[in-house]
Image (cartoon, rainbow, N blue to C red):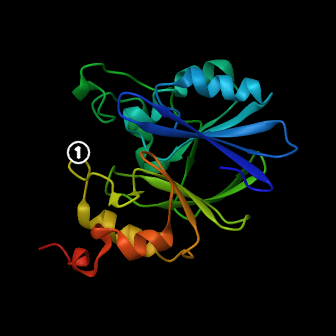
């Protein structure tokens, strides 16, 4: 997707259809990668084609399909920090927790270089990111909100999809917690806000507010 001031490339990785994003601002020579998946080669090719250095790797959560490319990107750009929410950091280095062991190919990412907390803001490659922790798909999933452009956009990981929400049947999942977090920390954004999810096509907050069946009023019943 192209804006007047920034560009976002989506790189989809088989076999699980995970979508990584390469973000860069026009006129700069650096970039940020969100959730590098199995197709690290295509991500590195995108950076090379654009003659960009990698300023940081941001992980929305620690499931294996979203961190599979961390090692290759870190090898190519050793000084690019891996940034992840504090409560999902242990998943990066634990094959059981990141679910790779369950898929019969245990794998690890390099450990995080920086941990971020709910509400924490930071700047990388000219982008100002606000961290919003929305657990429920994983113990410490975060989304990264960028509001310096119009419309605001969200790097949403596996929290909110077009017409759906993240799975909550993995270890550390909690459906009520996930829906409560979406309501409090995403549905408060403007309708025009774009959501770039970890699987599937982009969507908007307004579209999901109106049509997502998981976000109907009945979904907010408290547990028990």
Q: In which quadrant is the C terminus drawn?
A: bottom left
Say which of 221 and 153 sits in front: 153
Say which of 49 and 118 sits in front: 49
Whether residue 34 is visible to the viewer of this picture, yes or no, is no
Residue 214 drawn at (x, y percent)? 28, 67
Residue found at the far right of this picture? 27
Residue under label 1, please give it. 171
Residue 124 drawn at (x, y percent)? 73, 47
Residue 148 drawn at (x, y percent)? 73, 64
Vertically, is 113 above or below 74?
below
Residue under the image location 59 percent in, 24 percent down: 42
Vertically, is 145 above or below 185?
above
Vertically, is 188 above or below 31?
below
Question: Of helix, strand and loop, which one carries label 1?
Answer: loop
Vertically, is 53 above or below 188?
above
Q: Is residue 213 left or right of residue 37?
A: left
Q: Is residue 18 left or right of residue 81?
A: left
Dot 1: few (<14), some (14–19), or many (≥20) neighbours within 10 Å? some
Residue under the image location 67 percent in, 40 percent down: 32
The number of discs equals: 1
Q: Is residue 19 left or right of residue 167?
A: right
Whether residue 92 is visible to the viewer of this picture, yes or no, is yes
Residue 89 drawn at (x, y percent)? 45, 41
Image quarter for residue 194? bottom right
Image quarter for residue 78? top right
Residue found at the far left of this picture? 224
Say which of 207 and 152 sits in front: 207
């Amino acid at each position: 997707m192209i804006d007047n001031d920034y560009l976002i490339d989506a790189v989809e990785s088989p076999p699980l259809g995970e979508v990584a994003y390469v973000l860069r601002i026009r006129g700069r020579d650096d970039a940020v990668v969100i959730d590098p998946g199995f197709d690290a080669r295509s991500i590195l090719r995108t950076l090379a084609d654009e003659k960009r250095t990698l300023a940081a790797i941001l992980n929305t959560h620690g499931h294996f399909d979203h961190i599979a490319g961390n090692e290759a990107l870190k090898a190519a750009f050793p000084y690019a920090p891996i940034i992840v929410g504090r409560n999902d950091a242990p998943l990066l280095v634990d094959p059981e927790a990141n679910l790779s062991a369950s898929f019969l190919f245990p794998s690890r990412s390099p450990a995080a270089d920086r941990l971020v907390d709910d509400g924490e803001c930071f700047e990388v490659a000219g982008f100002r990111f606000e961290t919003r922790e929305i657990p429920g798909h994983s113990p410490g999933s975060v989304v990264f909100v960028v509001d310096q452009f119009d419309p605001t956009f969200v790097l949403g990981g596996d929290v909110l999809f077009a017409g759906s929400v993240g799975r909550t049947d993995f270890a550390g999942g909690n459906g009520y917690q996930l829906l409560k977090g979406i309501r409090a920390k995403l549905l408060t954004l403007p309708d025009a806000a774009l959501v770039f999810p970890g699987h599937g096509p982009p969507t908007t907050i307004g579209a999901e507010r109106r049509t997502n069946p998981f976000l109907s009023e009945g979904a907010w019943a408290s547990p028990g």
